[in-house]
Image (cartoon, helix red, strand yellow):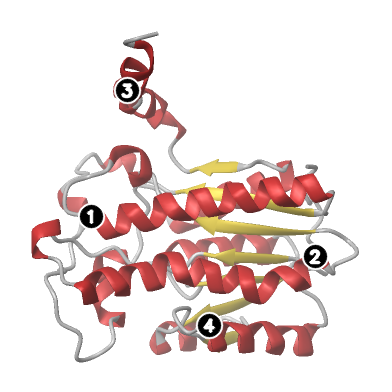
Amino acid sequence: MEGIKDWNGRVAVVTGGASGIGKGIAGAFREAGATVVVADRDVAALERARAEGYPAYATDVTDAEEVTRLADEVLEAFGRVDLVVNNAGVGPKAAAKDLTIEDWRWVLDVNLMGVVHGVQAFLPALLANPHGAWMVNTASMSRFFTPPGYAPYVASKAAVEGLSLTIAAELEAAGDTVGVTVLHPGAVRSNIKDSLRNRPSGSTGGLVDFDIAQKVTDTDMWIEPEDAGAIVLRAVRNGDRYAFTHPNMLGDVEASFDGVRAAMTRYS
């Protein structure tokens, strides 16, 4: 569908919006003229966002009631929602053999159910918007490369892509004026390397924080959150189904499908 080019007077909500990619997205849409509501569970980051003039709400996306309350408060305060960005996420590392069920549940609760809760809470308001509206869900380039040590993360991000594409197909089939973009970030400087700071106390398991900079040592591969935000804004304005922060990785993505292509053509 056609994108939304003019954001003056519109209202956007970004989860995980007080730092990292979320903060970059919030900044891009605010600069474009939108009122941007930041939702996050990081208290210190929320205070910094408030100091910068963002309406900021403490929100744990793993709690469906908190996300529903966020939607209600945004509608009460601003009277509309034009964009919801389900971006909050965590990315600690552990081999599958070392994971506990608590590990799996926490990562999936944040990365997948956090998106589900955002969809459930905000989709009715987006559908009711007479001016058209948009949803952006953050997946990951890891969905194409399946790096060892990230089974819950990759599983959650692959699910986010599938969920997003299915919702987009349903909305298009119904003729609704709500667009959907799936964001696949690559190496973006963020706080995801410190994910465990937000894990509920008392939880146990094998997950550890890992700085992906130890793996992606090519400094040319890294982009800033503001760059990611500009890419998302462009995608929404152009009505793009996908937003990729690293289009230069196309060759690697194509290579990742060689096994699929070989399997599908082997006996044809």
Can residue 230 be seen at all in this image of the molecule? no
Quarter residue 220 falls in:
top left
Q: Quote the CA–CA distance across marks 4 and 2.
A: 19 Å
Question: Residue at the location (9% across, 64% down)?
Answer: 98
Q: Which mark is residue 64?
A: 4
From the image, state whether disc 1 or disc 4 is nearer to you. 4
From this view, report whether residue 238 is shown above or below residue 95.
Answer: above
Question: Residue at the location (55% across, 49% down)?
Answer: 182
Residue 251 x, y percent position in the rendering: 37, 23
Q: Which mark is residue 127?
A: 2
Residue 185 x, y percent position in the rendering: 43, 49
- For marks 1 and 4, the one nearer the N-term is 4
| Contact (Cβ within 8 Å) of mark 2 with mark 1 | no
Q: Which mark is residue 150?
A: 1
Classify mark 2: helix, strand or loop. Answer: helix
| Contact (Cβ within 8 Å) of mark 4 with mark 2 | no
Q: Quote the CA–CA distance across marks 2 and 3.
A: 38 Å
Q: Quote the CA–CA distance across marks 1 and 4.
A: 25 Å
| Residue marked by disc 3 | 255
| Contact (Cβ within 8 Å) of mark 2 with mark 3 | no
- For marks 2 and 3, the one nearer the N-term is 2
Can residue 224 be seen at all in this image of the molecule? yes
